[in-house]
Amino acid sequence: MKNQFIEVPEAYKITSLLHQKTYLVSGELKEWKGEFTEVYSTISSTKEYKPTLLGTVPNLSGDEGLEALDAAYKAYDKGQGLWPTMRVVDRIECMEEFAEQMKTKREEVVKLLMWEIGKSLPDSEKEFDRTIEYIYDTIEDYKQMDRDSAKFEKSSGVYAHIRRGPLGVVLCLGPYNYPLNETFALLIPALMMGNTAVFKPAKHGVLLLSPLMEAFQNSFPEGVVNVIYGRGRVLATPIMKTGKVDVLALIGNSVSANAIQANHPFKNRLRLVLGLEAKNPAIVLPDADLDLAIDECISGATSFNGQRCTALKIIYVHEHIVDKFNKRFSEKVDALKFGNPWEKDVKLTPLPEPGKPDYIQELIDDATAKGAKVINEKGGKTSENYIFPAVLYPVSKDMRVFQEEQFGPVTPVVSFKNIQEPLDDMAASNYGQQVSVFGSEVKTLAPLIDALVNLVCRVNLNSAAQRGPDVYPFTGRKDSAFSTLSVRDALRSFSIRTFVASKENSSNNSILKDLLESKKIKLHKHRVLALRNLFINYLKPSHSRGFFVF
């Protein structure tokens, strides 16, 4: 397979290199005087293929990582810092300011998304817009959470004011496949809940954060957001060894997650918020709408070249229809258009990892050596920066492509006779994120769904696996996830329930009254009203009731 050179449109040409010379610590964009790492795109801008140099980023040492950690630790100040004690309305104001500044950088970020990770223009635009929407949805849910916390409870003569508080310092490590959206799905709720953060961008998709550095600096108090660049292990290892990190927030793989958390000296104190690997199956039943199943499986397996934890990574097809499915599925895969991200109607784009085509070829070679065949004509054909999706059949359990999360353009197909076969495979798997089920007979689907919901965290009925909408839970079982990432659940993942309680007595009544009258107490308006109403309702002289203080 040979790349056909098409001139890069003027709007997307790299006319100048982006040299990120600073990193963000304590509200200061500090200039780096040391070693830099060159950032290349696997997309060529010349007729003779060669990777395109996009710019450079600092290659910081462990000392700079510790500097960023100290800044976040100081900003949190044992829960007494400006950010964790800031009024809800003021924290929201900071986040809204960041979103507004971020919106002005859309064109730059979208362009870098295409060049850095090969994401198509529509998908790059969607990722940016979805991230903005995620921020505003998080703000709205945070407002609702704050309104809910103005409620008061009474049990056994004790009043309680229950709310959610921050956890402390967060080490945030995002993925390369969604370097903006999924990274911010960690960072935004962590900040919103009053935590401070040390954030390291992914290796691929690192430059696209550069246009947002000033927005981080301008929108948040010093030390709240600290952005560092370099190798993950060089930076994360000394940071974790200090024991000052309260939350490890990572989207990546379980091997990395285990290696990083192993460095923490107080593992029982470490909160984990992890989005990890998956081996999401599709199960195509004999009564499935084959047209629908094929279209959804195409989308689920090949969207962004299968480089998604939510991708369909193995397809189980009933033996009665597997031949028909394979023929039509393979033809549709071969019909997918390969090209650069900005080309019209392109579905397959260059892979951002230079070594990924070789890895996919290894999986293909292993499978074919053990009896599988590449059943689509274009499958496995390579160019300098791509390998065309290979559909493999029949696939057996001893093949690497059956066992591993391939995270790239290869789709294994397995036939089954009894539905218990894929269920047993899923139960034995190390992963448990999602499954897609295709069928129409309710009597078959109902018990199957009942079984599947206890194996994975999302069952997709006649539709491909996906993350969104972001208001729905996004998590997994076993090695696929720890904690839940979605608008509502992420706020809870990055916080802890705390409350202040008060027994009923006249002394507490008096304290409450003084609190309400004090001009020094910084209370949100609706909280003041709630307290006042409770005072009126429960603390009248005829009631001899007390109240709590928060």
Image (cartoon, rainbow, N blue to C red):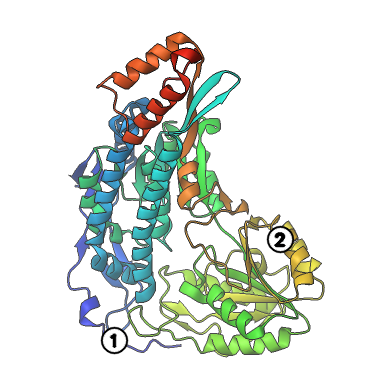
Q: Is residue 543 visible?
A: yes
- Which residue does the numbered mark 1 point to in the structure image? 47
Q: Is residue 104 left or right of residue 344?
A: left
Mark 2–mark 1 CB contact (< 8 Å)? no
For the residue pair 229 and 36, the one nearer the viewer reads as: 229
Query: Measured along the vertical axis of the image, is residue 428 above or below residue 234?
Result: below
Disc number at residue 507?
none
Local crowd size for mark 2, using a 10 Å CA cut-off: few (<14), some (14–19), many (≥20) = many
Along the horizontal axis of the image, is 425 left or right of 194?
right
- Which mark lies nearer to you, 2 or 1? 2
Give the SS element for disc 2. helix
Q: Indicate the position of residue 150 as horizontal and vertical percent values.
A: 43, 33
Residue at 75% across, 75% down: 441
**Sequence order check, earlier mark of 2 and 1:** 1
Q: Amino acid at mark 1?
A: Lys
Residue pointed to by mark 2: 452
Image x and y of residue 335, in percent: 51, 89
**Is residue 36 visible in the rendered structure shown here?**
no
Front residue of 153 and 308? 153
Name the kind of residue labelled 2 in the image. Leu
Residue 240 in the image: state x and y as whole percent. 44, 37
